[in-house]
Amino acid sequence: MCSYPMIICVLLPRFELAVAAGGRAGLLREPAALAPEPGREQRVGEVSAAAEAFGVRVGMRLGEALARCPRLALVPPDPAGVADAWERALVALESTGAAVAPERPGLAGFDAAGLRRMHGGLDATIAAVRRALAGPARIGAASSRFCAFAAATRARPRRPEVVHGPAAAYLAPLPVGLLAAREPTAALPEALERLGVHTLGELAALPRAALADRFGAVGLLARDLARGADAPPVPRRPVERLEESLELPEAGSGAQLERALGLLVDRLLARRERRGRTLRAVVLAAGLVEGGTWRERVAFREALADPGRMRLALGLRLALLPAPAETLRLAVERFGPPAADQRALIEEPADARRARLREAVRQARAVAGPDAALRVLAVDPGSRVPERRAVLTPFEP
């Protein structure tokens, strides 16, 4: 039994497309790709293997994708269905005893240190994971998280890829395009290839100072990944599922949707499982009449238990619906403290009020930009030119 650390990576290829298409059998009939989400940039999402044969790639503009493959079938995105299917997959992985760290839908990892003894070795642990998923999955195992992901991309549904040697030696001949899977380094592969760096081994051999000068902290992170150094997986916290759904008798929009939302809020707050706790973040989802779903995560500025304030905050998001809805669903993503423990509006310490003001300014700038919070600074009050009397400067509480 090996004693060195071993990270297992589980990769479900084209997960979002498979869920939206109603199963992997639908991906084999014809070239398919996820249609752009309404209101977003017109770029295709995940594509099937048949579409890749025509040169269609993830993130390609819709017009170019259709020009390369006129028979391309556009599948309406199903973010609500993807979230539900991914939650079921994570629960199945956790049933093996793994402390799962999800990275994105279709990709997760965990440390197999304790599981090898429980299941009787690494091979038995991988077999248990495969049985729990009950579907095609590519599984890779290595001493680092990034190396395990690289191994999973080279694995086959019935043959896992296990790296027993040093991670750096395994990664050396692989393309730098693997860095696109990480959000911080997603933009690096194109720039590196323009500079003549095509493999991770070539990237690892570059001087640290040169990468820092050219790409900053992102370049140093990419170099560490190529050399086999990576942070350990961070398991997700246990979540408590609490949700309410409502089927609309007709295609819902406008006032009808607002009334349905108010009913969902009242039902959710009346659930016994809430146990008097406030709500910190919720997920609002809808099934669209035209096909597909819509999903929006809403984090309240402070934990709420007031139905009026919740309706006001969530009602603004209903205006983003791209089409009439036939179903509406509201789920709790994170609970807050009990309602009785909420701070009083009177006699609050000055430091606490100042901290709340700083947080409000930070959130306003995150949504509306750096000019969302400004203050008037008197420069020349006696000037005859009104524009010279005062200027706007950033507000710092």
Image: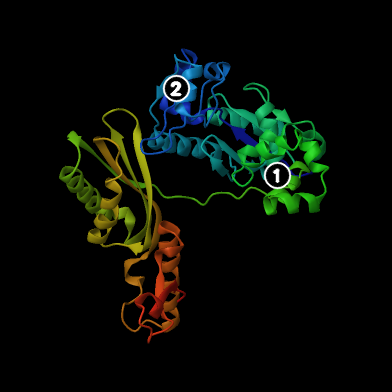
Tell me the quarter of the image containing the N terminus.
Answer: top right
Q: Residues within 10 Å of mark 2 (few under 14, many from 20)?
A: few
**Figure disc tally:** 2
* Residue 280 sits in quarter: bottom left
Q: Amino acid at mark 2?
A: Gly
Residue 321 x %, y % = 29, 41
Residue identifier under label 1: 113
Q: Residue furthest bottom?
A: 382
Query: Quadrant of residue 8 in the image?
Result: top right
Mark with earlier residue (1, 2): 2
The reply to whether discs 1 and 2 touch (Cβ–Cβ < 8 Å) is no
Q: Residues within 10 Å of mark 1 (few under 14, many from 20)?
A: some
The answer to whether residue 121 shows anywhere in this view is: no
**Secondary structure type for disc 1:** helix
Residue visible at 66% across and 41% down in the picture:
188
Q: Secondary structure at mark 2?
A: loop
Q: Is residue 77 left or right of residue 24?
A: left
Comparing 123 with 170, the one in front is 170
Q: What residue is rendered at 43% in x and 38% in y?
A: 83
Residue for point 45% across, 65% down: 362
- Amino acid type at circle 1 is Ala
Location of residue 66 with respect to 146 vertically, above or below: above
Q: Position of residue 245 (x, y in %)?
A: 27, 41
Camera-side residue: 329 or 46? 46
**Residue 356's spot in the image, x, y percent?**
41, 72
Placement of 267 over or under 337, stated as above or below: above
Mark number displayed over residue 23: 2
The residue furthest front is 384
Q: Which quadrant: the C terminus? A: bottom left
